[in-house]
Amino acid sequence: MRHWWVVMIAGLAVCLVSPTMSSINTPVVEMSAEHPATPSTFHVAEYAQPDELLVVDTVYLTDGIAVSERLLPHADGVVFHPGHLAAGVRVAEDGSLSGTARGPGTYVARVRGCVGVKCSESDLTLVVYANVPWQPRELTFPGRVGVPLRGEIGIEGGPPGALPTFTVTDHSKLPRGVSIGPDGAVSGTPAAGGVYEVPVQICVAGNCAGVVVQMIIV
């Protein structure tokens, strides 16, 4: 009789353990409440490689100063996707930037441009400097006919790290043989004497002012 009870207890234990072992050996399938388990197929449009859109991908601006810049794309005929970029700046279809820079700092915005149906994108970095006053350092340069002229306009003040640019707005006012570079360097050999007043635009991170550079050649 005792042997019969032992057999019954062993059989009952096997019945209880079998479902548990079956559940342990069954592979686990992960399910998602939001996405189907089968992979989806996405249509990928034809794009150029990233960062092929812009020749220059960094723009320097000054806090509180109206923006007057234009993006330069690698290809001709690029139409930009218009809209807000960052720090109060917008881009138009022709690549012109407008608005007023707000808040010193560095901002990165994604810019998209298309030529027909082919589009590409680039990250545009907007560096906004604090509005620190500046003034030209030198506006008068004496010289002699036939003697090389060397000098530099330069600036005093301005936000640290911001490099000024110098643009002659009327080259006919320069003495023959003399030039003013975009870095403000005055160089060349004057070919004729006289007093010359040359209009120059100086920009420091988009904060621009017009000045008159005087050259006195004897």
Image (spheres, helix red, strand yellow):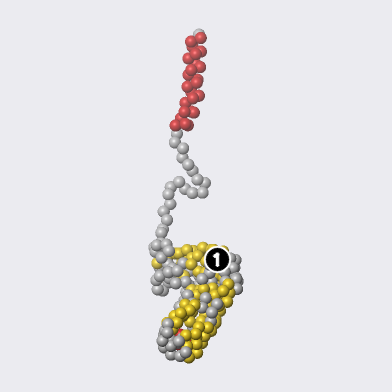
Q: Residue at x 50, y 75 (%)?
A: 165
Residue nearest the observer in this picture, 139 or 55: 139
Asked whether residue 158 appears in the rendered view, the answer is yes
Residue nearest the observer in this picture, 135 or 51: 135
Drawn side of residue 131 relative to residue 149, left or right: right
As displayed, is residue 2 above or below residue 163? Answer: above
Image x and y of residue 43, in percent: 41, 58
Residue nearest the observer in this picture, 37 or 216: 216
Amino acid type at circle 1 is Ala
Count of numbered tags: 1
Image x and y of residue 66, in percent: 57, 74
As displayed, is residue 214 above or below residue 36? Answer: below
Furthest toward the top, the residue is 1
Residue nearest the observer in this picture, 195 or 10: 195
Q: Residue at x 51, y 17 (%)?
A: 9
Drawn side of residue 86 relative to residue 54, left or right: right
Instruction: Name the residue that disc number 1 marks.
Output: 86
Drawn side of residue 83 relative to residue 77, left or right: right
Image x and y of residue 180, in percent: 46, 80
Image x and y of residue 135, in percent: 57, 76
Asked whether residue 98 appears in the rendered view, the answer is no
Q: Residue at x 47, y 28 (%)?
A: 21
Q: Residue at x 53, y 83 (%)?
A: 140
As displayed, is residue 14 above or below residue 56? Answer: above
Find numbered disc 1 in the image and state the secondary structure of the residue it sits on.
strand
Q: Residues within 10 Å of mark 1 (few under 14, many from 20)?
A: some
